[in-house]
Amino acid sequence: MLYRTMKNATPELSVLGFGCMRLPLKENGEIDEELATGMLRYAIDHGVNYVDTAYPYHNGMSEPFVGKALSGGYREKVNLATKLPSWLIKSREDMDKYLDEQLARLRTDVIDFYLVHGLNRPFWESLSALGVTDFLTDAIADGRIRYAGFSFHDTTALFKEIVKSYDWTFAQIQYNFMDENYQAGTEGLKFAAKKGLGIVVMEPIRGGLLAKDIAGISDIWRTAKEKHTPAGWALRWVWNHPEVSVVLSGMSTQEQVQQNVASAQSGLANSLTKTELSLFKKVKKELEKRVLIPCTGCRYCTPCPHGVSIPECFEYYNRGHMYEDEEQTKQIYTMFLGGFFNGIPNYASLCQECGECEEKCPQNLPIRDNLKKVVDYFGK
């Protein structure tokens, strides 16, 4: 295992972190604790020392599972990360209430890396008004958390604003070779690193989509002299960035754990050659050819008066066709547009065909007809 450090944190952190949002399940939908415990402990035994969970993962059962799985001496071997559930916070007292509950669920006296979860503009404005940064400072002072950070889902401009607002130790962003300009993106990554923040990356394999063996794509990877799985290539691209401290993988099988642990041996910064970097451009170009709705994500069509997240609906529809995986993209679509954070759905089926969006679209897209395609594809 390779390790990196954050500028303002003392521990060495494994370049591969274990994300506990996609643990293996039984037929009844509950976590397969025996299998998941074996996976987590295998990763730790092979050098992984960063374990990430959150209050809502697995319908609230991820934190209790992690607390149990880290018993028997494993808690002392890892840096534990979890997140304040932003959408549930209605008062300053709620912050302490949820943190104390999480400490109990995780069976620990301290959370090493504590994040404010899923920040966007509404969450940030609400939490700021309630004193979230004072809460973090107090929690560090009384020893309940060691380092404060935030995970992020909004624009680069807001990301920079949040970075400048507090003495954060780290930030967690979505980042992969298909999403260089998505949300915080490369610009945000470099900005935060310049400010001294460590960077934890989520979705390095785009929810598993970049791990697929896809005709026409796998052929490109096979031309490389050094051989890796598609997932291995995706991870290497993120690790190639020296600003990145930890790359999280939400592993669901023992095979994935073993493959990712093996891939981490190649997780050196600035290690990709020019020839290898050119492969990513070829793969990206080939995948982008498969886009069916040419939405640029400019967001001129938003906000929709009926609550449809129009650019995101088109993004997930395109992903399903790009990666030839309707089932996986439907899960992602349902999670992110089904009100996972705030209970308010943003599905394409909410469209009332008012046409306001089409009047604003600089691409002159038939948005209403395209939203019907999304509904036909995902069922909502």
Image: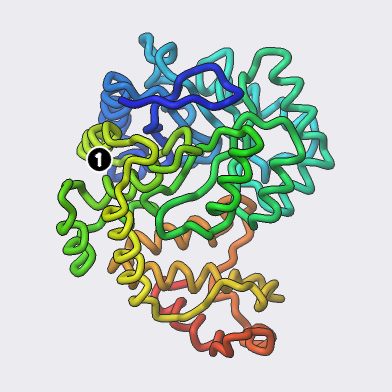
Residue occupying the point 61% across, 23% down: 8
Q: Quadrant of the N terminus?
A: top left
The amino acid beneath tag 1 is Gln
Location of mark 1 (residue):
256
| Residue toward you, 267 or 287 | 267
User: Which residue is most to the right?
Assistant: 129
> Residue 25, can we see it?
no
For the residue labelled by badge 1, is the local secondary structure a helix, a strand or a loop?
helix
Q: How is the image coloured?
A: rainbow
Left or right, 155 with reference to 249? right
Q: Quadrant of residue 327?
A: bottom left
What is the crowding at mark 1: few (fewer than 14 residues within 10 Å), some, or many (at least 20)? Answer: some
| Residue toward you, 158 or 258 | 158
| Residue toward you, 328 or 149 | 149
| Placement of 176 over or under 70, stated as above or below | below
| Placement of 256 over or under 217, stated as above or below | above
> Residue 251, can we see it?
yes
Left or right, 28 with reference to 258? right
